[in-house]
Image (spheres, rainbow, N blue to C red):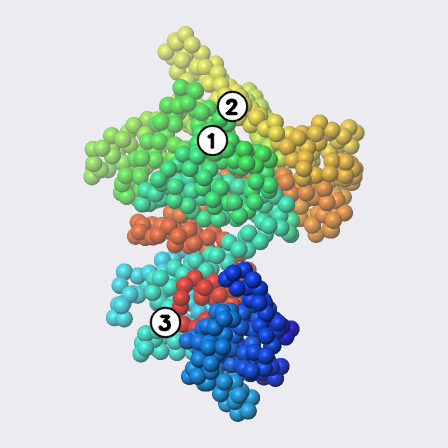
Amino acid sequence: MELEDVVNDLFAKPFHGLSYNEKIAIKAAGRPTPKIAITKSNGKCSTVNATWFARYTWLTGSVTTNRLYCWPCLLMGNAKSQTWSVHGFNDLKNLDRATKRHEKCQDHVGAAIRLSLLGTMPIDRVVDEGVRLQTQQHNAKVSSNRDVIKRLIDATAYLGMQEMSLRGHEEGGNSDNKGNYRELAELIARYDRVLAEHLESWKAVTVFTGMSKTIQNYLISAIAGSINSEIQKQINTAPFFSWQIDETTDISCQSQLSVILRYVNGQGTIQERFLGFFDVSSDRSAQNLFDFVQTELSGFNFKDKLVAQTYDGAAVMASDLNGLQAKVRELAPCATFVHCYAHRLNLVLSQGVKTIPQAKYFFIHLGGFTSFFAKSSKRVSLLEEFSCARIPRSAPTRWNFSSRVVNTVASNYDQLLQVFENIHERPKMDDETVRLADGLKSKLQEFEFVFLLLTFEQLFSHTDVVFDILQHKSMDVVFCKRRIENLLQILDELKAQSEFDKIYARAASLTEDPDLSHRAKRRLLNPRQSYTAIYASIHDNLRTQITQRFQHLDRLRFMELLDSAKFDSYKISFPTQLLTNLMETYGHFFDQEKLKIELQHFYQNTEINSSQKLCDALGFMKSSGLDGAMPQLYRLMSLIGTIGATSAGVERSFSCLKRIKTYTRNAMGQERLKNLAIISIEKKILKTLQKDPAWYDQVTDRFANQTARRIDLIYK
């Protein structure tokens, strides 16, 4: 400290807060006696005469505040002497009277004595040593407390990752089941001395038990917060990201909005990360969802880094006029909307059925098999008795569920006939069961039903594979688009006359050949020709709808730059139009000339362009160091990998929601639900973080700073 500033500096850093050596140094330097200029009430400036400092050995001043102070009171005084130690004195007209009165003040005399004794008695050193020992004891206690919290963190993380409930109905000391959290803590305490001593100590003196629901919520929040911090750290290092948003209703009829972020991490791996469930029950309009996005996701800098937004086909999300995707694009122009590929294919299959009367009625009757066995355990037992697989439930909005029913009925055709025949022969069966069994049996013996059953079984064997691929989180749009094109080729092949003949012959072998029945009854129409028309119309309808629903991707045409099937043609003629398409939307992310050069080398070199999947190409580029040699190409791969083709990741989170918020846990708070879902879905991140000992300190710091604690957790 400079001498003329020491008084003002003591206001910022009080004397009592200094170390013993610093106090001695200030005392040895003596009081400052600067030249003080004080402005009077009449506006004239008057300087304090140096004789005043000579007359009063305790008088000092500050050139910053231009006021006089008492040196002993400033250093060793108490709160009572604020005029001379805090506010300062500047009334020069009454200076003589004020100084004489202050010299007789008891506080001043005491401060002067304490200042004189400072450094002459060992008491200060004893006090400093006592403070050191006290700090040492405090830190030892903090270390012990943190060991306890570490075990509670592990117990909470374990139950969260396993999606188990933490609380019990009765958690008292005499309860047989105190809840998973308390029971797990007591189990750990049997083999762990630290936790055992803690649980024993709070039985005698209740200070901090760590067992209450409030503490559980704080621990859950701290763990989930550390996971979110890790996700945000990864996204901050990623060049861009996309999101998937969808909504569902939970067990307590609250509308839960799920948010997934997709990006390529530092290891070249495509990641989808869950941010949580958010209650939007009060208002599910596009404007309210947009307000939510601005509030909850603004920390990710989505205005500059968001490159795609993936939703299902709901108007509130997907509308070009006033939907969420349109509002988001006003803030983030690069956020291209991608209608989930899996939802598109689902719509193709469902709409394809509704437009063909025979197929529509087929699935209506097929639903009878599901409802028949779903209503009675006695009927289900008959399936087991005849070694028949259970009929899965169907869902009108999930077409792959219907395909499961088709495949099950087709593969268990003979066993189902035996089941229905046995029901008719058993006298103890109720009338409704017999009546319904006769109707379903007649359907299985009907040529048209069996023909359509085998037709859709053949179709679903191909569409189900594509549907499952589209729901994989690492799939990119280019690969999914290629799979859709392959599916179209397969549909053309299945439409061939030879394929129809196989299905027609098999259906005729299981039932009565309609061609023979036609001849016997002398009908005018040719049955084989009519079924040929039905068969062709099903394939034509599916092909037409697939083509229509997957063609509107003009802004994403640039993705064909990395379509491996076209690399040979790109060697001969570079796809300039595709590169131009990329620059129109994402041009500010790339150096066009450099990217073109890197793409030309990429197309020519088969050693680096052999990967069929983009996720494999990204990993190869990163592991081989080519991301540094060809940074623009790697950025393009990252961009295409970031643009998700499906919102299946969001729908997977709905399954977690059903497991966490159940009928018996339907009163769970929204924040607790959100954090438990994060711990469950992002358990891979959590397990990685647990391997770092420093992570426990970070979570404990979060826990300690959430509110005032009755347990010491912060080191001095």
Callout 1 amino acid: Gly
In the rendered structure, the answer to whether residue 107 lies left or right of residue 63 reads left
Residue 630 at x, y = what percent? Answer: 75, 44
Reading the image, the residue beneath label 1 is 323
Check disc 2 and report its element: helix, strand or loop.
helix
Residue visible at 28% across and 43% down in the picture = 377
Nearest to N terminus: mark 3 or mark 1: 3
Mark 2 highlights which residue? Answer: 545
Could you classify mark 3 by the number of other residues whose Cα lies within 10 Å: few (under 14), some (14-19), or many (20 or more)? Answer: some
Q: Nearer the viewer, residue 68 or 532?
A: 68
Identity, as a three-letter code, of the amino acid under mark 2: Gln
- What separation in Å lies between label 3 and label 1 (alpha carbons)? 50 Å
Which secondary structure, mark 3? loop
Side of 694 relative to 517 (left or right): right
Q: Residue at x 56, y 76 (%)?
A: 60
Q: Residue at x 47, y 73 (%)?
A: 94
Mark in front: 2 vs 3 = 3
Say above or below: 247 vs 546.
below
Q: Earlier in the sequence, mark 2 or mark 3?
A: 3
Under tag 1, what secondary structure?
loop
